[in-house]
Image (cartoon, rainbow, N blue to C red):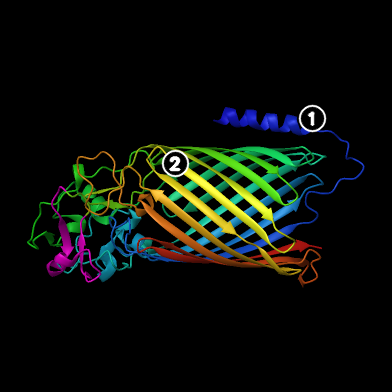
Amino acid sequence: MNKALNIFFCVCCAFALAQTDEDQAYKKRILETTEVDFLSSYYAQKGDNAAVTGGIGTEELTDATAAIIISIPLNDDDVLTVNTSISAYTSASSSNGNPFDITGASTGRGEDDDDDEDDDDDDDHNSGNGNTVGTPWNASTGASKKDTWFSVGVDYAHSSDDRDFSCNASASFATEYDYTSVGFGGGILKQFNQKNTSIGASVHLYLDKWNPIYPTELKSFEEVNGNLTHGFFSGVTLLDQSGNTSTAWQPHNGFQLIQNTERNSYAATFSFSQILSKNAQLSVFVDLLQQKGWLGNPLQRVYFGDVRNYYIGNAASIPVYTSKQNTDVFQLADDIERLPNTRFKIPFGMRLHYYLNENIVFRSYYRHYSDDWGIRSHTAQLEIPIKVASALTLYPSFRYYTQIAATYFRPYEQALSTDKYYTSDYDLSSYSATQLGFGLNYTDIFTKAHIAAFGLKSIDIKFYQYNRNTTFSSYIITAGITLVSD
């Protein structure tokens, strides 16, 4: 892959040097002055099909994100862009990696078992006698209830003198409590036919690594080699489906930790754009994406329908386990989700923009997606920017999505212990969804307003409401401001 990237960038540079210098007399800069974008968003979701608790349970999550993007013109032809972002989230479902913290069951450790820090000598951290409880319907107080995601990226872009050719190279880094990612990429764009036609290509490589966080009961079982009288299980009463005390529980195959914690992704994108008339522009694209490594999430439980169920908590609540009436019993996992170690994706789509007049534009979008896991999906979207004043534009939009489930998806307790691959992640299920959006944009190309030494170029505010044909729904509010140096 590195060799291919080297060849790609050599071709890119050679192509750039071969461009004509016929516009040397006067050449408009790609970017006149330094631009700074401040972006922020707030996201919230809810639902009843959490993958961390095997396909049932609360999916409540909130996320607040802030980002800064700085674009710096190095000369007439080159632009350097640096972007950093930070995201802080709270997740009820992720907190249930250790659901037993709901009653302080792990307070002897100081924090929940999700951190993978061994403490086998602490045998009295559980309440015992059935008082250690949890539920998939409420958040625990564990450390994994909240986390922070951070990323930084750098992009260098070059344009030829006649502006008919451009290329770029980029690098990125992202990290959160259980995952890190390093990325590299680059692309080229060539315009023909007096800039009415363009073709582009890009490649990206992502080298990711898990720091696996497992469900508490599974990791604890592995730590004590299956001895249910030691470690986390010391003093804890395990129950069978009838509510009777039992020590017969064990996870599938004794539970196997992840051996390969790497995930590599390779992507190539090809695009074509054509101005059809003074009012219409069409663009099409196709992506080829290959992933290799551990492609599941080690924190997500799976329950089998052909094995007995075991619980920790209040026996009286077992009959209403899948109901929100259950506030004090939790089912021990049979395994984590296990998926193939390769995945090949092919999204392709098109955009058609039609300029009705100087005040109204129709922006349509369609995408078809397929992969070798069996997922097939269709996305259709229409956005209609409406200019209500010289500097003010409204952005109403509607999006529809439909998906066929992955071959390996199974709802709660419908996977079998004889299956090779299985997941209860409803993102891989069959569903349809709609999204309604509304945005407001203020743009002043003359930057009359100022903030310190920067002129105010634009302000964007958007709201999107998303609903699936399940219990899942979400909304997101985004805001952005663009400043330019004087």
Check the picture and name the quadrant holding the C terminus. Answer: bottom right
* Magenta span: 306-332
Q: Quadrant of residue 57?
A: bottom left
Helix, strand or loop at label 1? It is: loop
Which dot marks residue 370? 2
Q: Please say if the residues under marks 2 and 1 sit with CB atoms less than 8 Å apart.
A: no
Name the residue nearer the viewer: 31 or 46: 46
Name the residue nearer the viewer: 146 or 444: 444
Density class for disc 2 (Cα within 10 Å; few <14, some 14-19, many ≥20) is some
Q: Which of marks 2 and 1 is nearer the N terminus?
A: 1
Q: Is residue 271 magenta?
A: no
Q: In which quarter of the image is residue 99?
A: bottom left
| Vertical position of residue 202 compared to residue 413: above or below | above
Residue at figure coordinates x 73%, y 58% from the top left: 35
Which dot marks residue 481? none
Q: Does the magenta stretch include residue 322?
A: yes
